[in-house]
């Protein structure tokens, strides 16, 4: 792990937007957490476990069944900020096929085809991302992962959306994704679109449970997800050159320590472990894959809405095995032109909001901007 304690705090230019200030503040928070972390194997498992929540009853017509799931979600959100879901309704076959498409993307697409859809051609961070093109924090700057990033299109939304989608920067042109040609990777787009549609609808369902978990009406967030942001990534973490349980050397960081930016993330991972989450006492805990399960983690918007009651937990990926690891996170956001502001019900009498209001898309864009080595976008 790179030395972080001595790095001076990032200073805030006076002309920055509120969302950039917020994005920089998260980096400073991360620095504090990392300097207190122990880069050693965890002995905390058992004390701080990632719960498994069966979503089956959440599809019941009975409100009390749905509420029972929501209270398990509440408990997970105020402790780990991470949980697995089973019984989520996305067939295992679709999950496995989508992971197989990720593998095909990285293995079969030619370097020329990857170059054509390189992220440098996108002003919205879409497309193919070679290893070390971005790094999610300023301390672990040689990330081994490579990725392919794409976002919401109304054609991928089974609800069709309300036709008012705006991009991260508030512009209204849709369709900024960079897809490989059908002839270059036959069947890729159709397979990815099928998974995207399913995971998007699942995210909308889970968002209703989040509302219940906060004692809000189930449809509280509904007006905010009529044309939601939803970035997804296919990620390939190469096998370790020197597989060993620990310690991690900087060359082996797949994806550096970070919190996610949006409402919550739904992560599909293959059977190779690698995801680790930072416990309150600074231990890295492995989020080992659960067969048929999807990892859910609270991200920054939910932390901000709840004034920190829901934990946007720091996590990272280190592939310590001799196998490639593929994963597919889906980052569910509200409409990018909507605001995130502390919920009145999450402030006790006299309690002040820790987080100023931000515009959803702008905040995501500012956080993404900080991942580029150039520091700009
Ligand atoms: O690949 C994983 O397991 C996690 C990915 C992740 O945390 C991210 O892309 O934000
Ligand atoms: Fe993440």
Image (tube, rainbow, N blue to C red):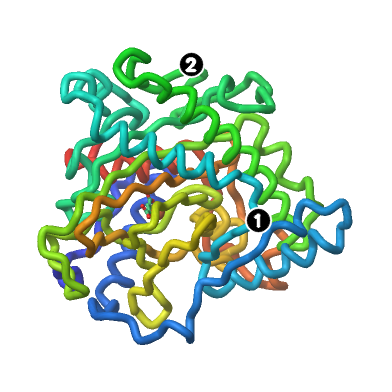
Q: State which quadrant residue 248 falls in.
A: bottom left
Q: Nearer the viewer, residue 265 or 303?
A: 265
Please state the horizontal and vertical placement of residue 33, each as a whole percent of the image.
Answer: 33, 72
- Rendered residue at 78%/62% (across/down): 215
Q: Quadrant of the C terminus?
A: top left
Using a 10 Å C-alpha cutoff, classify the residue at mark 2 as few (fewer than 14 neighbours), some (14 to 19) or many (20 or more): few
Q: Residue 173, labelled with which disc?
A: 2
Q: Secondary structure at mark 1?
A: loop
Is 187 left, or right, of 317 in this rendering? right
Q: Is residue 128 above or below residue 60?
A: above
- Residue lying farthest to the right in this orientation: 62
Say if disc 2 is inside 8 Å of ligand 1: no
| Residue 359 visible in the displayed image | no
- Rendered residue at 57%/66% (across/down): 310
Q: State which quadrant residue 79 falls in.
A: bottom right
* Precedes in sequence: disc 1 or disc 2: 1
| Residue 228 visible in the displayed image | yes
| Disc 1: which residue | 87
Q: Is residue 205 above or below residue 186?
A: below
Q: Nearer the viewer, mark 1 or mark 2?
A: 1
- Rendered residue at 50%/59% (across/down): 291
Is 221 left, or right, of 370 in this rendering? right
């Amino acid at each position: 792990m790179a030395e972080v304690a001595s790095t001076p705090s990032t200073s805030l230019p006076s002309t920055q937007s509120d969302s950039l200030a917020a994005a920089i503040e998260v980096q400073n928070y991360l620095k504090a957490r990392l300097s207190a972390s122990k880069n050693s194997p965890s002995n905390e498992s058992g004390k701080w476990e990632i719960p498994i929540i069966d979503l089956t009853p959440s599809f019941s017509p009975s409100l009390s069944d749905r509420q029972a799931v929501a209270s398990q979600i509440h408990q997970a959100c105020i402790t780990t900020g991470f949980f697995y879901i089973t019984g989520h309704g996305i067939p295992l076959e679709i999950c496995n096929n989508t992971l197989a498409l990720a593998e095909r993307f990285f293995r079969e697409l030619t370097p020329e085809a990857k170059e054509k859809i390189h992220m440098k051609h996108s002003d919205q961070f879409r497309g193919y991302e070679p290893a070390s093109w971005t790094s999610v924090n300023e301390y672990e700057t040689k990330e081994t992962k490579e990725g392919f990033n794409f976002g919401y299109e109304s054609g991928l939304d089974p609800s069709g959306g309300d036709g008012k989608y705006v991009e991260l920067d508030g512009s209204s042109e849709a369709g900024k994704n960079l897809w490989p040609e059908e002839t270059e990777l036959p069947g890729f787009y159709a397979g990815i679109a099928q998974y995207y549609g399913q995971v998007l609808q699942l995210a909308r369902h889970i968002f209703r449970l989040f509302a219940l978990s906060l004692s809000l009406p189930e449809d509280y967030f509904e007006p905010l997800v009529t044309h939601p942001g939803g970035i997804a990534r296919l990620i390939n973490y190469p096998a370790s050159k020197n597989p060993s349980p620990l310690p991690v050397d900087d060359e082996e960081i797949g994806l550096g320590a970070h919190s996610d930016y949006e409402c919550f993330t739904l992560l599909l991972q293959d059977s190779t472990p690698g995801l680790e989450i930072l416990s309150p006492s600074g231990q890295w805990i492995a989020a080992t894959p659960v067969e048929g399960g999807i990892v859910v983690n609270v991200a920054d918007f939910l932390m901000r809405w709840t004034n920190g009651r829901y934990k946007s937990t720091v996590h990272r990926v280190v592939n310590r095995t001799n196998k490639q690891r593929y994963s597919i996170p889906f980052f569910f956001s509200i409409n990018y032109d909507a605001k995130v502001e502390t919920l009145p019900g999450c402030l006790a009498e006299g309690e002040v909001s820790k987080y100023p209001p931000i515009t959803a898309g702008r905040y995501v864009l500012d956080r993404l901007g900080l991942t580029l080595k150039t520091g700009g976008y």
